Amino acid sequence: MKIITVSYRLPLSIKTQNRKTSITQSSGGLASAILSYSEKSEANLTWVGVADFEKNIWEKHKDNFPKTFDIEPVFLEKKLNKNFYNIFSNSVLWALFHYFPSFVEYSDEAFDAYVEANAIVAQKINEIYEPGDIVWIHDYHFLGLPNLIRQQNPKAKIGFFLHIPFPNFEIFRILPNKAKKYILDGVLGADLAGFHTWDDSIHFTECVEKIMGYSQRSFTFTQDSHRTKVGSYPISIDFNKFNDAYSKPEVGILRDEIKELYQDKKIIFSVDRLDYTKGINNRLNAFERFLIKHPEWKEKVVFLLVIVPSREEISKYGERKRMIEFNVGRINGALGNYKWAPVVYQYQSVDFNRLIALYSSADVALISPVRDGMNLVAKEYIASRQDKNGVLILSSMAGAAKELQEAITINPFDTELTGEKIALALNMPQEEQQRRMERMQNYLKKHDVFLWANRFLKEIETLHLQNSNAIPLNAKEIHNITEKYETANKRLFLLDFDGTLVSLQPRPEMAVPDKKLLDLLSKLAENPKNEIWIISGRDKEFLEKHLGHLPIGLVAEHGGYIKRTQWDSVIHGMPEWKDRVIEVMEEYTDRNAESFIEVKEFGVAYHYRNVDEKLGFLTSRELLTLLKNHLYNTPVQIIDGNKVIEVKHFMAHKGTTCRDNILCGDHDFVLAFGDDKTDEDLFEQLTAENQFSVKVGKGNTAAKYRIASVAKVLELLSELAENTVVLNR
């Protein structure tokens, strides 16, 4: 087994100097964390990414450097890479996902390049993939990749992690339809789709529900080949690497230089890539506001602002650089003097030792992105403070703010309040600084990048094992079930109705049992060893009218009512939310004449199977969202079914009703059939060796077996009723 890690940039650099080429492998946090996991799991690590070097240089030198894992570069043609990376990835996805829709520069040519680049990388992965490998795909450059890998390798273990925010539906919907669907279907190819925060996870699931029409249950989407779990997995750093660096002699020398240079001044420090999402001008304006409102700090504080060059070939980045430099000059000119420049600005990269020296010299770290998936700079600052001094001011728009609770949080757009928070930080007593710092450090020690990678990769393995392994009911399996049936003395049948015993119809009242089905159920029930139950979502009046004369048990409203000799309610008291739900649904039936409402005692269903497909889908997504908000904190379950949205009492549950009232007997053979999401509740209860659960039709399932259609269900039940074994089918 190996771990195939995929990211746009490869964890290595190639430099040619004085006609000598050298290759060095990166020791970054992500590479170190995955390598650590691969060593513990005895799995090899292979890294796939887009090459930023020439193919001939790689071929010549690829074996001439020490490496701890394999590298598989993908070489993209320059124009393709430009459209894929610069335009679609960074001028469309980056801008949109960070809530800058006005910065989006969409073109079909760029989207086509994105699709093509993802396909080329998928081809590379398919060439090296072997059964049992884990494929872990990183970031917004490869949103289509999980699905492409899944198409070629249906049983692959695939994880996807997004390192930037995922936008809400109103922002995401701006993309053209083909781009939206490609992205969502792409990510849903993974077993595990990870985001930094639960907000991002919720945004993603909402987009999938509203745009694709796929329903989720506990942040899990069920598909034919697999399930996709969506969750929050906040990335972190190598805490010890940053904390230990504080004591390095070379860091100490650099720190002393900084302290000596600004010995009588407090230091505020910021370091960021050049990017419009970082809110650099906002923090400059807040610092200016602070100096104006607190003139006592003039000549007693300095703001060290380090900007690391990034994506200068993209026009918005060049514009941002000019704006920042203008602002720095304006503030220094207006508020500084010949002895003191309030802002010390540096536009260049900083090596690791100097970065630690700056972190550990700063009295305040001012980190104020206007939107950020996580922001590891905040975590690096905390980890580097071995002395436990310093104050972190952190934007509430950064994912890290949800974890670093002891930071002073700000709204980066509120310059006046941010200015006051700067004053608060500069005046904070040392005891409070150390208390806050220690708490944040304790958290980061525990939740480091190694725990993050370990948790994510283990979760992929676990989810893959839980994915549907439903076995098609072929002749061999039917023979096995029939043999168990023949030797059993107390048999239990649990049968769904619609979509299992009768085919789905345009209206529920049209789906009624015919004489052939009634005779089949009667024949099964005649055998004294058999106990037959119909487990349906229908109301008790329908079941009583059409099936009540048979010597079988009935469960109505997904478990709300149960009948042996007479009907008993599992639920006590009338739902107070029912009238509200009917009122909301009636608005939609008024708009769509072909839709209708089915009112039950403990639930209400909105059916739209007769509505125009596109209109019905869009209407159902709106209704689904509206119901979720109306019924928040209400004891209900909202089911997004097959052309139906149903609201039912949370105790109307097939699984628990059967477990508590039917499965508690001493049956030595149990056979359950069902086609719907509600039947999964029952399938999850049937785990014993003598319990056989069967999913009717397509879709990922917790059932042990799968059968193609209603006709096949009736055929198998007829064989069991006749007590015959059919070996050839």
Image (tube, grey):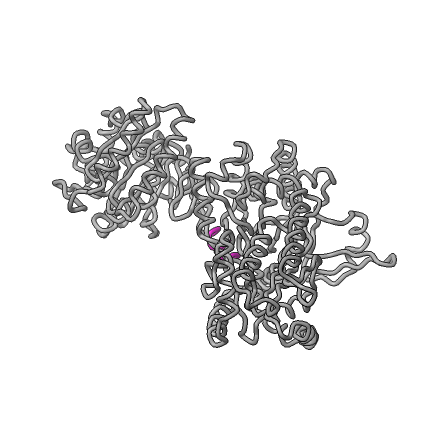
Answer above or below: position of 16 versus 97: below
Q: Which residues are magenta?
A: 456-465
Whether the magenta-drawn stretch holds residue 331 is answered as no
In the image, farthest residue toward the left: 566
Judged by its main secondary structure, the magenta piece is helix
Query: Residue 38: where, in percent of width, then height?
Result: 59, 61
Instruction: Classify residue 308 as left or right of residue 611.
Output: right
Instruction: Classify residue 389 as left or right of residue 658.
Output: right
Q: Determine the residue positioned at 31% across, 41% down.
A: 638
In this orientation, which residue lies closer to the viewer: 712 or 123?
123
Query: Residue 702: where, in percent of width, then height?
Result: 38, 46
Query: Residue 180: where, in percent of width, then height?
Result: 52, 36
Query: Residue 269: where, in percent of width, then height?
Result: 60, 64
The quarter of the picture where the C terminus appears is: top left
- The answer, for residue 36, to whether it is visible in the render is yes
Instruction: Classify residue 661 as left or right of residue 2.
Output: left
The quarter of the picture where the N terminus appears is: bottom right
In the image, farthest residue toward the right: 19
Answer above or below: position of 593 versus 714: above
To which quarter of the image does residue 710 belong? Answer: top left
- The answer, for residue 679, to whether it is visible in the render is no
Whether the magenta-drawn stretch holds residue 457 is answered as yes
Q: How many marks?
A: 0
In this orientation, which residue lies closer to the viewer: 24 or 166?
166
In this orientation, which residue lies closer to the viewer: 520 or 351?
351
To which quarter of the image does residue 384 belong? Answer: bottom right
In this orientation, which residue lies closer to the viewer: 561 or 563?
561
